[in-house]
Amino acid sequence: MAIADGSVSAAGRLAEVRRRIERAAKTVGRDPGDVSLIAVSKTFGTEDILPLLETGQRVFGENRVQEAAAKWPPLLDRFPDVELHLIGQLQSNKAEMAARLFRTVHSLDRLSLVSALARTDPEPDAFVQINIGEEAQKGGCAIADAPLLVDSARAAGLRVRGLMCVPPAGVEAAPYFALLAKMAQELGAPELSMGMSGDFETAVMLGATQIRVGSALFGTRAGG
Ligand SMILES: *Cc1c(COP(=O)(O)O)cnc(C)c1O
């Protein structure tokens, strides 16, 4: 488990991130209320998550089904209005388990996962993850395959809320965010899950409706 940075309170960090979202949204004339902040709690334990829950944060993201299944049920008992989002790769054989925990899956990246998710009850909402930088090692479906994947997911009855991406590391993210926004518009899947601790303001200015922020809220992760 990672150790959260204790020098600033969770409430202080949350307030600062919210201030930055608001500033970025207003810069481009967007309503900050149209941006949902997903607090990415992967690798962090109950003692680090509780302060954010007590501050009122209710939307959280995890990247591993098993890790979430181990730590969230007792917290969900105490805070039943929490909404969990799966932001990491999902194996088809864990789709059932994922559907029981997560309201939304941000990593729908292949046809076999469409069939697996369409068989779950309840079915989670989906974001189709795009390998926006066309990187060999990166998750997400190829740009050219996105229309078929979105169509298939809809045909299978899944609610496709939009597109998700993790742009290439170490380069300016804006062109990738802009490309994702253009694709989402063309596919009629209007929501955009994009932006992390290092680039969420850029993402908000380019239309993100869901930003996934971990370290800016919890501190640096050990590994993970
Ligand atoms: C870990 C992770 C994040 C959060 O990253 P930070 O840089 O800590 O904000 C966002 N999205 C995905 C897919 C992740 O795996």
Image (cartoon, rainbow, N blue to C red):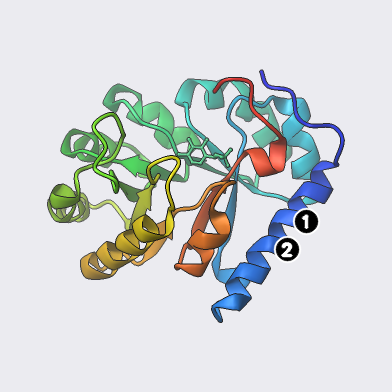
**Could you say where residue 131 lies in the image, as x and y percent from the top left?**
28, 43
Q: Which amino acid, mark 2? A: Arg
Q: Which amino acid, mark 1? A: Ala
In this view, the residue in front, 191 or 96, is 191
User: In the image, is residue 23 above or below residue 5?
Assistant: below
Which residue occupies 31% across, 35% down?
Answer: 139
Decide if residue 139 is on the left or right side of residue 224. Answer: left
**Could you say where residue 84 lies in the image, as x and y percent from the top left?**
54, 42
In this view, the residue in front, 223 or 192, is 223
Label 1: few (<14), some (14–19) or many (≥20) C-alpha neighbours in 10 Å: some
User: In the image, is residue 54 above or below residue 191?
Assistant: above
- Say which element carries label 2: helix
In this view, the residue in front, 83 or 120, is 83
Residue hosting label 1: 15
- Say which element carries label 1: helix
Which residue occupies 63% across, 21% down?
Answer: 222
Decide if residue 129 is on the left or right side of residue 48. Answer: left
Residue hosting label 2: 19
User: In the image, is residue 193 above or below residue 141?
Assistant: below
Q: Is residue 57 visible?
A: yes
Do the CB atoms of the residues marked 1 and 2 lie less than 8 Å apart?
yes
* Quadrant of image for the C terminus: top right
Decide if residue 30 is on the left or right side of residue 174. Answer: right
Label 2: few (<14), some (14–19) or many (≥20) C-alpha neighbours in 10 Å: few
**Could you say where residue 26 lies in the image, as x and y percent from the top left?**
62, 77
**Which image quarter: residue 221?**
top right
Total number of numbered discs in the rendering: 2
Which residue occupies 75% across, 43% down?
Answer: 53
In the displayed orientation, state which residue is furthest to the bottom. 29
Q: Which mark is residue 87?
A: none
* Quadrant of image for the N terminus: top right
Q: CA distance from mark 1 to mark 2?
A: 6 Å
